[in-house]
Image: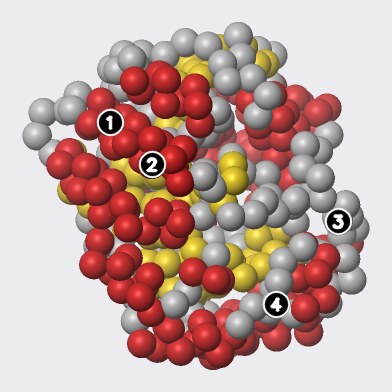
Amino acid sequence: MSIITKMTRSWLTRSHKPFLFQNEYDKVLPYEECHSLGLYVHIPFCKSICNFCPYCKVRYDEEAAGRYIDALIREIHLVGGQSEGKKTATSLYFGGGTPALLADRLHEIIDAIQTHFVITEGIGVELHPDNVEPNLLRTLKAAGVTKISIGIQSFQTKFQNILGRKTVNRAKIEAALSEVPFETVSMDFIFALPDQSFEDLKTDIDSAFSMGANHVAIYPFIDFTFTSSEVKAMPKRQKRMLLDAITKYCMEQGYKRSSIWTFSSEKDAKYSSMTRDNFLGFGCSATTLLRRQFKINTFSVEEYCKRIDRQTLPTSLTLRFSERQRMVYYLFWTAYSTEVRADDFEQFFGVSLRRMYGFELLIARLLGFVKKRGTVYRMTLKGAFYYHYYENFYTLAYIDKMWGIMRKEAFPAKIEL
């Protein structure tokens, strides 16, 4: 796996230099120059820990959670106060963990954000199925939340058992969504689970849309080395057949494909914190992507709070991009939306996409991975699968290694990838 990612990185960046993350940070984050700026807030607390989940999380403790939220609000002011006036941000997303455990304080966090930023495309919050009940949903709406994403994983008991989750109360969720509607209701599912069939996944997707969802996400199962999950990944050929079949089915139903893994039944139903040119992350493990650098906060709740207590940003590692490295990062995550617009690339970097990667795009077209229409490159079904296939390599070669280290060390000296 590392050979594939190293060769790809070396070719696309035209350099053998690795991505070097170092324990350094800037006192001032240069986000004023950034356009299409997204915001993300991480809430790491969960009532119980799912063994397949790779994200930064800890068991909920009321005192620790209260201290964390206080620190989080101070971090927002530390960063936001660096800008004169209010900066426009496309969106704000809360992830975790289980943000709903602290639903009564989300309005404080949102108020702090809105002191420094104007949010133009809404506010989203991830929810556990148990969170979907009318009173909590009303609390979220009162705080300004317009989008919710429910981590269903599967409605079917056999897969819930595999994942160590309890059966989802579909009637309760449907009733709550009917009583308290949102602009976007997304439901997340995991695909490529052992022996999962097209009918299994189709049933889940049909159920989601019939219950009130207008957006679904079908994320592939990835076997992170540092989780305790014993679930085995689906073989490549079987996975491709499943992804192609479910994609074709969704397109035949008239659902809009808004990214590699997501489909919506309504034009304006969107839920994605990933497809942004730049973003600011607040909280433990949150990442920040700027024009020339990528930052990641410490994974330690305790060390995070100590840093904020000292009026210091909780950055653990910083990657300072070369121009080519930034281009590769831009293309990788822009392609997640299934298309790359040459005009947007040129506006961002001041140089044409064809000049920088014309040869690679020609090869991608010849291999049937993309089709070109005007200045837009769109992925084919084949291209979408191989994007997923490479993303799996990328995740295990880069993210798995980095998160594995940062779960153990609050501030590593450096990580080379």
**How far across and how far down the image is residue 260, in percent?**
60, 60
| Residue 289 placement (x, y as % from top left) | 43, 32
Q: Is residue 129 left or right of residue 234?
A: left
User: Marks 4 and 3, Cα distance to the nearest angstrom?
Assistant: 18 Å
Question: What residue did someone put label 1 on?
Answer: 74
Mark 1, Cα crowd under 10 Å, few <14 / some 14-19 / many 20+, is many
Mark 4 and mark 2 in contact? Answer it, CB < 8 Å: no
Instruction: Identify residue type, mark 4.
Output: Thr
Which residue does the numbered mark 4 point to in the structure image?
167
Q: Residue 57, percent across and down?
A: 59, 43
Image coords of residue 123 (percent x, y): 32, 58
Q: Can you say which quadrant of the picture contains the N terminus?
A: top right
Give left or right: position of 116 versus 374: left
Query: Is the C-beta separation of discs 2 and 3 under 8 Å?
Result: no
| Helix, strand or loop status at disc 1 | helix
| Element under disc 4 | loop
In depth, the one of 108 and 374 nearer the eye is: 108
Q: Residue at x 42, y 20 (%)?
A: 306
What whole-number distance in Å separates the C-alpha atoms at marks 2 and 1? Answer: 13 Å
Disc 3 marks a residue whose amino acid type is Val
Instruction: Compare marks 2 and 1 and give the one earlier in the sequence.
Output: 2
Whether residue 182 can be seen here: yes
State if disc 1 and disc 3 touch (CB < 8 Å). no
| Label 1 or label 4, whichever comes before in sequence order | 1
